[in-house]
Amino acid sequence: MKKLLLILFIVLLAKASYSQVCCGGGVYDVAVLSLNKRALFNVGYKFDNYLGVWNSDNQWRKLSQTSYQMTPTFSGAYRFNKQLQAGILVPFVINKNELPELPQNGSGIGDVVLSGRYEIFHEYTLFKDKDKFKTDKKTPYLALTFGMTFPTGKSDEIANSEVDITGKGFYTTSLGLSFIKTILKDKVQIGSDISWQHSFDKTYNKYYGAEVPSYKRNQGERFNYSFTANYLINFYNSVSLSLGGFYQDKYSIDGTSIGNSNENAFSMITSYTYYPKTYIRVSPLIKWNIPTTGWGKNATGSILFGLNLVYYLENLEDL
Amino acid sequence: MNKLLLLIFCTIVFASCSKENPTAPADPVSSYTKVLTLDSAGFKIEMYNESSSILFVGYNEIGFKVYVNNVEKKTGFFKYTPIMFHTSGPGHATPVQSEFQYDNSKGMFKGYVCYSMLSDTTSFWFADYNYNNENLLKKKQFDVVLGTGNQMRIWFDASSSLLYNLTLITPKDPVVGLNDFKVILHTTTDQTTYTEVSNAQMYIRPWMSSHGHGSSSNVNPVFTNHGKYEGKCNLTMPGLWYVFDSIIVNNQTISPNPLYLVFDAR
């Protein structure tokens, strides 16, 4: 009986420690639940300090003025069963742009994101082999991810100024894959996330509140990618490094694509995660672009500081 | 100790008695640079350009100092008439202020000229210089080169059978943020005489084509004087911006579609 309890304890411990970095260990999306969590509530904060912009010739142009965006976010996620979970993210956007004679401050609710994932495989699941329970050490974690962004923020159609903009103004859907594989158990994981984002047309009848002849604008198709490595220092601490970026195709006006308007950028993210309790997670992170010619096109470069405080509800049911 | 205090006191007193007079008037033409000097039979002209010793294609803020028998003239008017000749084909004039009046603050006869072309091996600029219809210098050659930041748009409006010239005054060196947007509009029927247009309505729309967005807080240019229109354009981020300008004269849109000026905001 003691042996059975000991085995059970080890299995539970392994599962718990794995869950600390799995899924939630990625730095892009904290609203993701591991198998032993039923729900989470997250309070996040991002400070995105804009450094400059790459032009259409991939040349880096430094910003001379102070310009940043702060985004407190509230997010939550709920696991329905072993395969399916869903999440919601509600951002509040605070803009600052110190240009003379222009409005310098603006804020408002941003675009709300609903997301979900269908988990096809989990790592370290138990299976029965000749009346014995064994752990599957080969299968990686693999999930199909999907989501939708709602234009709940204020776009350039009705905003009074640039700092008043808190949203894109159009619906966006996303579809992707999330992959994680433990290399060294309870120590090292690698993962990758890829996603395709499709934006729907936005019809403009106004621009910054002034009436304009009606036209349709469509943001180009976007492809996001990231590669992440997690290192579990001990039961309470982990660090991760992520390399990521995106490529976005040319935007179009009334169906005509605009030449040389495609975008891309590359960024690096490093984060640290502290787990004071199994149901609490504290994750500061830094994301930065390389502000040099050649590392982006038609995109903004910035350095971002973030902090996420996550509270989990444990999953007490056997999934 | 007393000697030391006395020394410090004297130092302060003498230092404050500098001969330098901070309120001395500045040279009124210091912001202008001499471009050329013409001298013939006691009639001497010095031509100045604001901020450069070169004349550029596009808008030039210029001035003339006039001397007759070594006496500087500060009254009356001055007329400047540039004409371009080509080795083949007819010549033409270019928009220029009809009369230059003496500006005491600048110490010269001040006005503008908008050169529509640059000098090259087949195209030559000449000018007539006229003071008060009393002294005249004719057909003196000079050079015009391409400059950075100067822009001019020329188009024919079929509905009115007029040729229009829109010339940028500012910004020549655009910055990120709000820029003074100044243009000057001329019309001509024969490319010999140009008329300043004073009754146009202008509507500008900055657009960053590579990013697919415009900007807020722009101010449409309004007429000020001498065919000039002043407004504000907001170039919100570094990079290439197109500022589209729709122009209406006598309730008719006379600008081609599209009519735009290009700016590289830094």
Image: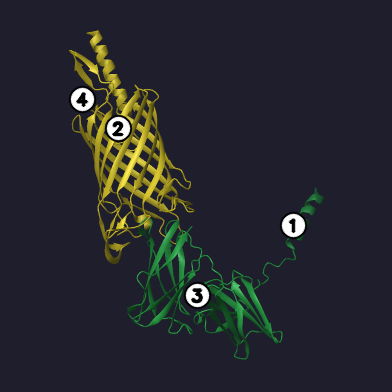
Chain colours: A yellow, B green
Helix, strand, or loop for circle 3?
A: loop
Tell me which label, 1 or 3, sits earlier in the chain. 1
Circle 3 residue:
B116
Residue A125 in the image: above or below residue B38: above
Helix, strand, or loop for circle 2?
A: strand
Q: Is residue A93 left or right of residue B180?
A: left
Circle 4 residue:
A316
Q: Amino acid at mark 1?
A: Ile
Are the residues under badges 1 and 3 in a single subunit?
yes
Labelled disc at residue B12: 1
Q: Is residue A3 left or right of residue B87?
A: left
| CA gap, disc 4 and disc 1 | 84 Å
Q: Amino acid at mark 3?
A: Ser
Helix, strand, or loop for circle 4?
A: loop
| CA gap, disc 1 and disc 3 | 59 Å
Q: Quadrant of residue B188?
A: bottom left
Give coordinates of residue B45: x percent, y percent. 65, 81
Q: Amino acid at mark 2?
A: Phe
Q: Amino acid at mark 4?
A: Leu
User: Disc 3 vs disc 2: Cβ atoms closer than 8 Å?
Assistant: no
